[in-house]
Image (tube, rainbow, N blue to C red):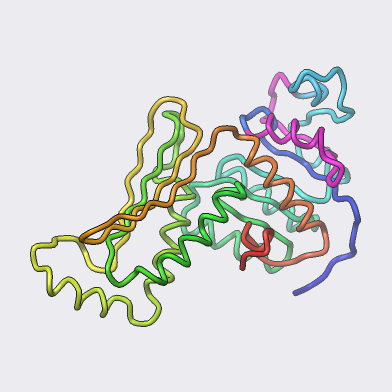
Amino acid sequence: MMQKINNLIPRVCISGINGRMGHQLVRALSKSDRVILGAALTKTNSRLCGTDVGKLIGFESFGVIIRDCIMDVKDDFDILIDFTRPEATLKYIDFCCRYNKNMVIGTTGFTDIQRSVIHQAARQIGIVFSSNFSIGINVMLKLLQITTKIMKNFVDIDIIDIHHRDKIDSPSGTALTMKEHLLTIMSEDNCCESILDYYNQHLNVQRELCSVKMTSIRSGSTIGEHTVFFSSDGERLEIAHKAFDRKIYATGAIQAAFWLNVDKVGLFNMLHVLGLV
């Protein structure tokens, strides 16, 4: 792994400062002694441009002025924390590669081509890229890996994700990450052949072999719920996570920024940050 010059206390820039996660990140950073808020970005010509970040969370002053152009703050931060939209994230990736800034990316909804841009950028800078920065969700991913290794030959697996009505992507990025982890484990040790033998004995079962089904519900103000069912003929195991406050994502993102600092180059996720890889 390549190394950069180390900086003990990283300075972060928050993009999309006026969004839900932007507010949560400012609140979390106001209580952090491991990471410093150095800059904040909003959309072009926003009424927030030129105001102090502190006003977003009821502080008279935070000492950081909100800008609408990343070039205006290029010397004020080391790591960009980005929870925006794919198109904006790609522009920030280009900037960070040009000016040697690391990134924490929580944006979801990328296409395969857009994800390849992230992978390419990680050859030059350090990126923690995760669909979910909740510590609980990432522990759940580890549990899903263990459970799938044990039960993959004789269960149906279903993922259900529930989010608020305004969430754009469906299924959620977290649900897709779960499916990717599950299918990786299921592809090991000729799992498909074992499942085929099992289904040949149960000809009335119509499910596609070696599949993981996903169901998404967009309703109300639900922050985020994910449940995975492992169902056999006689029992069902459920592994579930429910988010009650978006601050868990902000806390995880800041932990990721502190772990990443300015000295790592490569593509990482929260499992790396938590030491679960």
Residue at position x 75%, y 51% from top?
A: 257
Query: Residue 233: x and y, percent?
Result: 20, 61
Q: What span is colored magenta in the figure? A: 21-48
In the rendered image, residue 197, in percent from the top left (x then y), is placed at 19, 78
Which of the pair 216/3 is nearer the observer? Answer: 216
Quarter residue 150 falls in: bottom left
| Quarter of the image with the C terminus in it | bottom right
At 33% from the left edge and 51% from the top edge, which residue is drawn?
214
Q: Residue at x 41, y 59 (%)?
A: 179
Counting from the top left corner in percent of width and height, residue 171 is at 39, 46
Q: Quadrant of the N terminus?
A: bottom right
Q: Residue at x 33, y 81 (%)?
A: 190
Q: Is residue 64 above or below residue 169?
A: above
User: Which image quadrant for residue 62?
Assistant: top right
x then y, percent, for residue 84: 60, 39
Side of 156 where 167 appears, left or right: right
State whether residue 40 is above or below residue 214.
Answer: above
Residue lying farthest to the front in this orientation: 234
Whether the magenta-drawn stretch holds residue 166 is answered as no
Per the image, is 31 magenta?
A: yes
In which quarter of the view is residue 259 placed?
Answer: bottom right
